[in-house]
Amino acid sequence: MSTQYEIRQSEKYEGNKWWKWAVWIEGSDEALNEVEYVEWILHPSFPNPVRKSRDRSEKFRLETGGWGVFPIHAKVRTKDGQSYKLSHHLKLHYEDGTQNTE
């Protein structure tokens, strides 16, 4: 199902097979203004793998770090009670541009 929301990411290689990364929701200002919160579902190996963000000013951004790639799921809950499920496969790259596949 196509929605008005999309997950985007940033990443920064820190060295020693470790990255700092962030995910957030992109959409029109009108669509983002309707979001009550985003529930991020991370890999079960994370402490507190289910995390909520209510910060509209940061596009419901979640910042964390790790060493591996995995699918990130998000449930966007709107103020009128609707839910949208999104997923994004986290991509991590070394400084030379090669992709981490672990």
Image (cartoon, grey):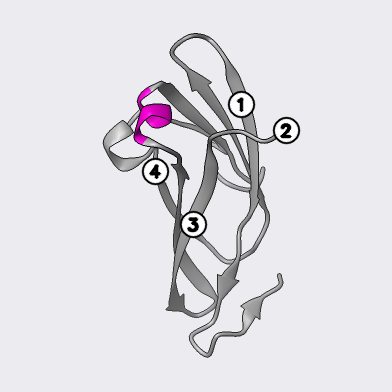
**Residue 1 has which mark?**
2
Indicate the amino acid at tag 3: Gln
**Mark sitting on residue 47:** none
CA separation, marks 2 and 1?
A: 9 Å
Give the mark toward the camera: 2 or 3: 2
Q: Residue furthest left?
A: 57
Element class at badge 3: strand
The picture quadrant where one finds residue 4 is top right
Q: Main secondary structure of the magenta part?
A: helix
| Tag 3 and tag 1, C-beta contact below 8 Å | no
51 or 47, which lies in front?
A: 51
Residues rendered magenta in the picture? 29-33
How far is disc 2 from disc 4 in space, using C-alphas? 23 Å
Give the label on residue 9, or none. 3
Question: Disc 4 vs disc 1: which is toward the camera?
Answer: 1
Disc 1 marks a residue whose amino acid type is: Tyr
| Label 2 CA crowd tier, 10 Å (few <14, some 14–19, many 20+) | few
Label 1 sits on residue:
84
At 72% across and 33% down in the image, what residue appears? 1
Mark 2 / mark 1, whichever is N-terminal: 2
Which of disc 4 and disc 3 is earlier in sequence?
A: 3
Rendered location of residue 89, percent (x, y)? 66, 55
Q: Amino acid at mark 2?
A: Met
**Is 17 placed left or right of 68 in the picture?**
left
**Residue at image mark 4:** 61
The nearer-to-camera label among 2 and 1 is 2
Could you tell me residue 36's position as x and y percent? Answer: 41, 20
Label pair 2/1, CB-CB below 8 angstroms: yes
Whether residue 15 sits left or right of residue 75 in the image: it is left
For the residue marked with disc 4, what is the amino acid?
Answer: Arg
Earlier residue among tags 3 and 1: 3
**Mark earlier in primary sequence (2, 3):** 2
